[in-house]
Every structure is written in C-alpha cells, then in structure tokens.
Image (cartoon, rainbow, N blue to C red):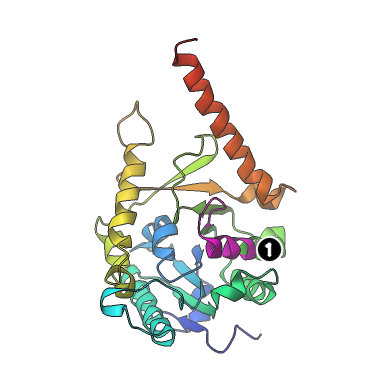
Amino acid sequence: MKFFQPSADLYAPSGKDPLAELSSTTHLGIGAHADDLEILAFPGIAACFQHPKNRFSGVVVTDGAGAPRSGPFARTSDADLMQIRRSEQRQAADLGQYASVIQLTHPSSTVRQTDRSAVIGDLIQILEVARPQTLYLHNPADRHETHIAVLLACLEALQQLPVSARPKEIYGCEVWGDLDWVPSSHVVRLPCSAPENLGTSLLNCFHSQVEGGKRYDRAALGRRHAQATFGNPTQPDSEQEVVLALDLRPLLETNLSLHNFVGSALDLFRTQTLARIEKLAPKK
C-alpha cells in the first residue's frame, strides 16, 4: 500500500513503526494545521493521557507555510517555518504521549480547491488503519476557510468507508469561533479530564505561534474554562474545562447537506433568542 506524498512526516513517540502505532488508536484528531489538534482534539488527548488502554493519534493536513509570524519569527521563510512547525508538532506528540502523529504537508491552497482527491485519498488510508472509536474534526461553523476545506475532505473520506469502519463518535470542535451560541439540544459538551497544565504545555510546544504573535496557549485555556462555567446558569460547574462540539454523525447517516445541518442550528438559535425577548420585553 502506498502511503502519502514524499514530504509527509510520520512519527511515533515510542520509536516504533508509526503506522503500527496508528493501528492502536482509539481517539483520532484531524486538523488543518499544526497546533489545531491541541485545541480541537484536546478532549481526546486528555482522555488518552496516561491511560492504560486509550491511545490518541493526530493528523495534520497542511504544511503550515502560510502561518502568521512576528517577533523572533518575523523573517522566517515558508520553507524554514514548515520544518519548525513539523518539529513542534512532534514535540507536542511526545509531551501528550500520542500513539502517532501524521503530517501530510498538503499546501493550504490545494486543500481549498474543489478537487481534494489527493487529501481524501490520504485520509481514507489513515482512517482504514486507525479505525478510531472517536474522531475529532473541525466544525462546520468555523470561520477559517482552510478548516472548512479540511472538514469537507474528512466527511468525503468517511462517506467512502463502509459503515462498519466509521467511528462511533464524530465531533466537530471549536477552534476559530466558539460554539456557545448553539442551542443546548444541538451542542455536545466534551470534558477535558487531564492535569491542569497539560493543555497549556502542549500549545507552548508551538513556539513559532506563541512567540510569533498568537497566544493560543492562553486563549484555548480561557475558552475551555469559560465553556465549563457559562454552560448552565442554574447549576454549579461540573467540569473544570470543556470543549463544545457538534455531533457530525447525522451528516453521514442521512442525506442532510452541510448547509442544512448548520442552517437548522442557526434557525433554532434565532427562534429561541427572539422567543426569550418576546417573553420578557414590554409590549408596545
């Protein structure tokens, strides 16, 4: 079986064969960029950290060449940045005790094209080997176009798998944009049960981002704490950190389009918001 393009990086912190380690995966995250996994798939990383049976693996689809940069990385070339981000993602895999991490190194411009067949082919092979129980993806309300393109490629890959080979749980999680606007009947709350400093430490592996002008370490931690506290105004907090997600299984189990999937949540948000105002606002 031919795996991936020559520039792809396959890594297992254990030092064993990355593909063999991939086959032990129980929780899989697929993100567009290096450090997306440590935000959107943190519930899975936390569920596997120091766990005797759970194993987390991650997939990074793009090469990271277009990342914003400032400070000590302001003059870093695209080629150098790609190598730096590859190394940073490996460091995060070591720290998070991942089973494996696969960096596919597709250019973002390629991923955003209508023809994503090369990316889809890679993802099908990964999913066939990994056979995860739980899968973490970008969510369809994300504001980053490359994230949406990667999500579309993931959904196409999943649709080409036999039903028996699909993960039992498929979540679209927060990165660019919160999901706290989604009605409670449509949102899934994913707790992050791990040592308190794990999430921040993982994101601090990405020096080219944190020191280069994007404090994802502080922002992601703050959002997880906020989602844990602001989920329910009438009950005490039950978790310290929470990531919000959309259950994406209906997109595979029905003929529902991505457009209608998001539209139904938006329609319900509008209906419920206006109903609260109508109920309490003075009548004129």
Which range of residues does the magenta coloring cover?
Answer: 138-153
Q: Is residue 202 above or below residue 44?
A: below
**Residue visible at 25% across and 55% down?**
196
Q: Is residue 149 above or below residue 278?
A: below
Residue 194 in view, yes or no: no
> Would you identify the image quadrant in which residue 217 lies?
bottom left
**Spot occupied by residue 5 in the image (x, y as percentages of width and height):** 59, 86
Q: Residue furthest front?
A: 284
Q: Residue furthest bottom?
A: 6
**Residue nearest the viewer, comparing 121 with 112:** 112
Residue 140 colored in magenta in the image: yes
Q: Amino acid at mark 1?
A: Glu
Is 134 situated left or right of 85 in this image? right
> Would you identify the image quadrant in which residue 261 lies?
top right
Q: Secondary structure at mark 1?
A: helix
Quadrant that contains the N terminus: bottom right
**Residue nearest the viewer, comparing 203 with 194:** 203
Is 122 situated left or right of 255 in this image? left
Residue 195 colored in magenta in the image: no
| Numbered circles on residues, count | 1
For disc 1, the marked residue is 156
**Spot occupied by residue 171 in the image (x, y as percentages of width and height):** 53, 52
**Spot occupied by residue 195 in the image (x, y as percentages of width and height):** 26, 57
**Spot occupied by residue 137 in the image (x, y as percentages of width and height):** 53, 59
**Residue nearest the viewer, comparing 124 with 88:** 88
**Residue visible at 30% across and 46% down?**
225
Residue 11 in view, yes or no: yes
**Residue visible at 35% across and 72% down?**
92
Q: Is residue 133 above or below residue 87?
A: above
